[in-house]
Image (spheres, grey):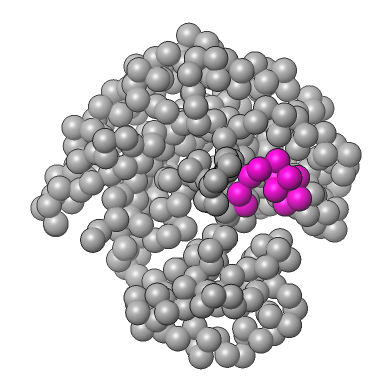
């Protein structure tokens, strides 16, 4: 049976680009936002028709507003996109609908409208509870604004709140990270995304480090921070279900019901369709990416209904490699028998040279017929994954 798909909707608008950000963003301008939202609705309809021609009605169970800053646009515009998805696709009776929120573009007046639109999961980009760190990242909010945002979401009725924090920032001490982690856990969100900083070449932060304006992040210190994350989240009742993601578990539960249903599609190979400029899609056989620039995206959609910039058909070998390293991101790892059945690959035989070396280094283990990353393997996951490429 085909897995339900997810819809990712890219909202590229931001007040200001963060120093660490390499996502596809553009300055917020209301007339442009109106044209953009209209184009996204056209693209949603286009894909519903194309997919229906290929294999009947497509079922979806998640919608994810990412960015950019989805919270910067009017709630009514987001509501119209939710309705467009529900009209275009066969929608699960209780879809997970997520909005990424920047506390700097947040207002209490928006919350009820989000809930009315069906948005039921809030992902708040806190990044830090220390104001000087927020300034260094060019964030547009303060730590107090982040706390007020979360409190307001909770008071209004949001029952599924996720917080993002970044560890391993330049000049960040272990005590700073402990402070951030403690404050996040005190707020008791249903979900936490706790990332180690990756300095991307196209970012302001990369340029600052290159010019000697900021120190290079300390990898050993970041490793200590990651170990702190693993211990603290476990102590506070969170399931470490993916390398950087944690869901709250309650008495009697072994698997968190607050795992991100949408993001799980990326890690388990389920189909997802991205709409908006620069959005990515995957249908089980191919991956494709939309045009990056918002103006060019709008023009393409207005003319043709779609805006694909690049498409890559996947070979069976591609699919198997992706499934292996994406599956290893999850706590459950990869079922060796299931993988052999799905892809015709005996993992232990195919990687007979790499696996003993990784196991001896304490990065990977075989348990209960599954290949699983160890705690150390999660920290050094990129080094593990490159062995399977």
Which quadrant would residue 356 be assigned to in this image? bottom right
Relative side of 268 to 378, left or right: left
Comparing 205 with 133, the one in front is: 133
- Seen at 34% across and 50% down, the residue is 272
Q: How many marks?
A: 0
Q: Please state the extent of the stretch shown in magenta in the rendering.
A: 229-240
- What x and y, as percent, mark residue 238? 63, 44
Q: Is residue 204 visible?
A: no
Say above or below: 54 vs 197: below
- Position of the N terminus, as image quadrant, is bottom left
- Seen at 52% across and 11% down, the residue is 108
Say above or below: 90 vs 360: above
Task: Inspect the magenta stretch and tell me whether residue 385 lies in it.
Answer: no
- What x and y, as percent, mark residue 112? 42, 13
Relative side of 143 to 211, left or right: left
Comparing 311 with 263, the one in front is: 263
- Seen at 14% across and 57% down, the residue is 54
- Seen at 46% across and 48% down, the residue is 263
Relative side of 131 to 81, left or right: right
- What x and y, as percent, mark residue 168? 78, 47
Which quadrant would residue 337 be assigned to in this image? bottom left
- What x and y, as percent, mark residue 21? 62, 41
Which residue is farthest top?
109
Comparing 284 with 140, the one in front is: 284
Which quadrant would residue 188 be assigned to in this image? top right
Which residue is farthest front?
252
Q: Is residue 272 visible?
A: yes
Comparing 128 with 365, the one in front is: 365
């Amino acid at each position: 049976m085909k897995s339900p798909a997810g819809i990712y909707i890219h909202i590229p608008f931001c007040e200001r680009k963060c120093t660490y950000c390499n996502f596809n963003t553009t300055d917020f301008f209301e007339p442009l936002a109106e044209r953009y939202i209209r184009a996204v609705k056209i693209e949603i309809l286009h894909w519903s028709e194309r997919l229906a021609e290929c294999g009947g009605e497509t079922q979806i169970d998640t919608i994810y507003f990412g960015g950019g800053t989805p919270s910067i646009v009017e709630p009514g515009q987001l509501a119209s996109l939710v309705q467009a998805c529900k009209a275009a696709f066969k929608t699960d009776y209780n879809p997970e609908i997520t909005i990424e929120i920047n506390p700097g573009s947040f207002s209490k007046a928006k919350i009820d409208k989000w809930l009315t639109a069906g948005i039921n999961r809030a992902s708040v980009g806190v990044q830090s509870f220390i104001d000087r760190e927020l300034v260094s990242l060019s964030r547009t909010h303060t730590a107090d604004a982040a706390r007020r945002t979360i409190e307001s979401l909770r008071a209004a009725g949001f029952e599924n709140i996720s917080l993002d924090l970044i560890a391993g920032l330049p000049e960040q001490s272990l005590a700073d990270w402990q402070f951030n982690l403690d404050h996040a856990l005190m707020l008791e969100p249903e979900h936490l995304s706790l990332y180690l900083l990756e300095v991307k070449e196209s970012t302001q932060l990369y340029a600052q480090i290159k010019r000697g304006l900021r120190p290079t992040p300390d990898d050993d210190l970041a490793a200590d921070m990651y170990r702190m994350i693993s211990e603290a989240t476990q102590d506070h009742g969170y399931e470490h279900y993916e390398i950087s993601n944690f869901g709250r578990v309650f008495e009697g539960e072994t698997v968190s019901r607050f795992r991100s249903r949408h993001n799980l599609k990326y890690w388990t190979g389920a189909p997802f369709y991205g709409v908006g400029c620069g959005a990515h899609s995957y249908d089980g056989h191919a991956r494709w990416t939309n045009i990056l620039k918002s103006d060019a995206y709008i023009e393409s959609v207005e003319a043709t209904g779609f805006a694909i910039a690049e498409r890559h058909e996947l070979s069976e070998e591609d699919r198997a490699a992706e499934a292996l390293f994406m599956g290893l991101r999850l706590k459950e790892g990869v079922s060796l028998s299931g993988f052999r059945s799905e892809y015709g690959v005996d993992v232990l035989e195919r990687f007979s040279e790499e696996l003993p070396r990784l196991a001896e280094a304490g990065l990977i283990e075989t348990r209960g017929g599954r290949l699983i990353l160890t705690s150390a393997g999660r920290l050094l996951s990129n080094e593990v994954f490159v062995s399977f490429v």
